[in-house]
């Protein structure tokens, strides 16, 4: 099958409604597009996930892989659950999606799903991504490949930010606010600080912390696995705010969105102070917020360009593009460099299109990349 070119409003290749196999489960797997018979994406499990949300995320995966030049389509899974009885849920899920996994639809981890959950549904389905008919075996197991790549998404988001700052003619240290201090937010903050930029605000689910200069390593040392910063162990001379979305009020050149969906929305976009917004999270800004940000003169680098690290490096393995024969350190560096190259090129080209005409530049860049991948 050749690369398909989904347009806005186009139906996914197919949607599987999950009711369970030998148990009950409610959810969906949406395969937005297939390329060479392959598609992939993460599975999320939340009480409120909807088919529409999963469709939107599957389309995002298609766009990410198209932009990165990877020969694989986009998919996504969603399970409606509060996480109770998760072992049984993932056993049932594994039995239900078994034909998909063995048929070229690779499903990974997203919000609310852990690597332990993935191990349960892979085992139940008898699926090991090392082996697929017609392609060489992976010589190492998935965890050995993927675990060293924890920071790769944040690395790519950092590259997008630095590239966009350069393109805007910004010189000297930029003042940075990072909304969300989880795996992605911490890695971006570290990346930018290492390159001489100054983190002046970070936010987690409890509120916003700001200062003239926040010490990233010190904050990361008092942050738990869920990205919650311990307020009783903060560095001195910081300002705390529990006001909703107070991260928008911190004076900054760059805002990195690395938390929840639609963090920037029609309701709060008028408070945006930074001239540059980089999306580390998926669907971090609503469509209306993007329009408002553009109208106010701000530049926005979307998540489908900036945050491809995690999905891209998984897709590199599924499509067997990774040079697996390299030693572990060199292999990790190869993946980080690959992600940085793709993010840099897409960010530059997006901003060039944006400078040449009005309106959203992303559809034009997607057309260009689709042609290149054909
Ligand atoms: N980890 C990856 O490789 C990856 C890849 C692509 C996209 N994403 C997306 O990026 C986002 C961040 O991912 P992560 O792995 O860092 O998640 P995480 O769970 O490790 O961290 C999330 C952070 O966001 C904060 N947060 C949640 N709700 C918030 C709110 N309302 N206001 C302010 N902060 C809030 C949390 O307190 C935490 O600090 C998620 O939406 C995720 O789906 C992650």
Image (spheres, rainbow, N blue to C red):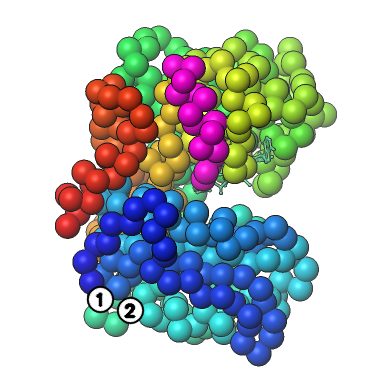
User: What is the quadrant of residue 258 in the picture?
Assistant: top right
Q: State the image coordinates of residue 178 (x, y, percent, origin top left).
A: 58, 28
Of 90 and 21, nearer the camera is 21
Q: Secondary structure at mark 1?
A: loop
Q: State the image coordinates of residue 247 (x, y, percent, origin top left).
A: 65, 23
Q: Residues within 10 Å of mark 2 (few under 14, many from 20)?
A: some
Q: In the shown orientation, is residue 95 left or right of residue 146?
A: right
Q: Residues within 10 Å of mark 1 (few under 14, many from 20)?
A: few
Q: Residue at point 71% right, 71% down?
A: 86
Q: Is residue 317 visible?
A: no
Q: State the image coordinates of residue 210 (x, y, percent, origin top left).
A: 67, 18
User: What is the quadrant of residue 110 in the picture?
Assistant: bottom right
Give yes or no for residue 372 being in the magenta stretch: no
Write down the residue under mark 2.
Answer: 132
Query: In this picture, which residue range is highlighted in magenta?
Result: 281-297
Q: How many marks?
A: 2
Q: State the image coordinates of residue 12 (x, y, percent, origin top left).
A: 42, 65
Q: Which mark is residue 135?
A: 1
Q: Quadrant of the C terminus?
A: bottom left
Tags 2 and 1 touching, CB below 8 Å = yes
152 above or below 5? above
Q: Quadrant of the N terminus?
A: bottom left
């Amino acid at each position: 099958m050749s690369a398909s070119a989904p347009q806005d409003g186009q139906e996914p290749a197919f949607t599987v409604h999950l009711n369970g196999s030998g148990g009950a489960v409610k959810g969906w797997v949406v395969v937005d597009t297939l390329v060479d018979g392959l598609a992939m994406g993460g599975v999320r499990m939340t009480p409120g996930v909807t088919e529409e949300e999963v469709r939107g995320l599957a389309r995002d995966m298609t766009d990410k892989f198209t932009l990165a030049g990877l020969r694989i389509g986009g998919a996504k899974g969603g399970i409606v659950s509060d996480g109770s009885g998760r072992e049984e849920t993932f056993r049932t899920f594994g039995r239900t999606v078994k034909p998909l996994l063995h048929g070229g639809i690779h499903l990974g981890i997203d919000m609310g799903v852990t690597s332990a959950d993935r191990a349960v549904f892979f085992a139940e389905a008898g699926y090991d991504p090392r082996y697929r008919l017609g392609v060489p075996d992976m010589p190492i197991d998935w965890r050995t490949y993927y675990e060293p790549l924890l920071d790769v998404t944040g690395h790519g988001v950092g590259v997008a930010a630095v590239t966009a700052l350069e393109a805007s003619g910004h010189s000297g240290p930029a003042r940075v606010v990072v909304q969300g201090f989880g795996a992605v937010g911490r890695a971006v903050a570290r990346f930018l600080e290492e390159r001489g930029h100054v983190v002046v605000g970070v936010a987690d689910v409890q509120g916003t912390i700001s200062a003239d200069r926040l010490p990233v390593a010190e904050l990361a040392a008092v942050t738990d696995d869920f990205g919650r910063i311990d307020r009783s162990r903060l560095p001195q001379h910081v300002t705390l705010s529990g006001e909703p979305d107070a991260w928008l009020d911190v004076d900054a050149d760059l805002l990195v969105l690395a938390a929840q969906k639609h963090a920037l929305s029609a309701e709060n976009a008028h408070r945006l102070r930074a001239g540059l917004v980089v999306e580390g999270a998926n669907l971090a800004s609503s469509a209306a917020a993007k329009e408002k940000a553009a109208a106010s003169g701000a530049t926005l680098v979307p998540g489908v360009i900036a945050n491809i690290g995690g999905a891209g490096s998984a897709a590199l393995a599924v499509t067997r593009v990774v040079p697996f024969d390299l030693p572990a350190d060199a292999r990790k560096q190869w993946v980080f460099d690959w992600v940085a190259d793709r993010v840099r090129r897409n960010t530059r080209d997006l901003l060039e299109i944006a400078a040449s005409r009005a309106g959203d530049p992303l559809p034009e860049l997607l057309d260009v990349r689709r042609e290149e991948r054909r």
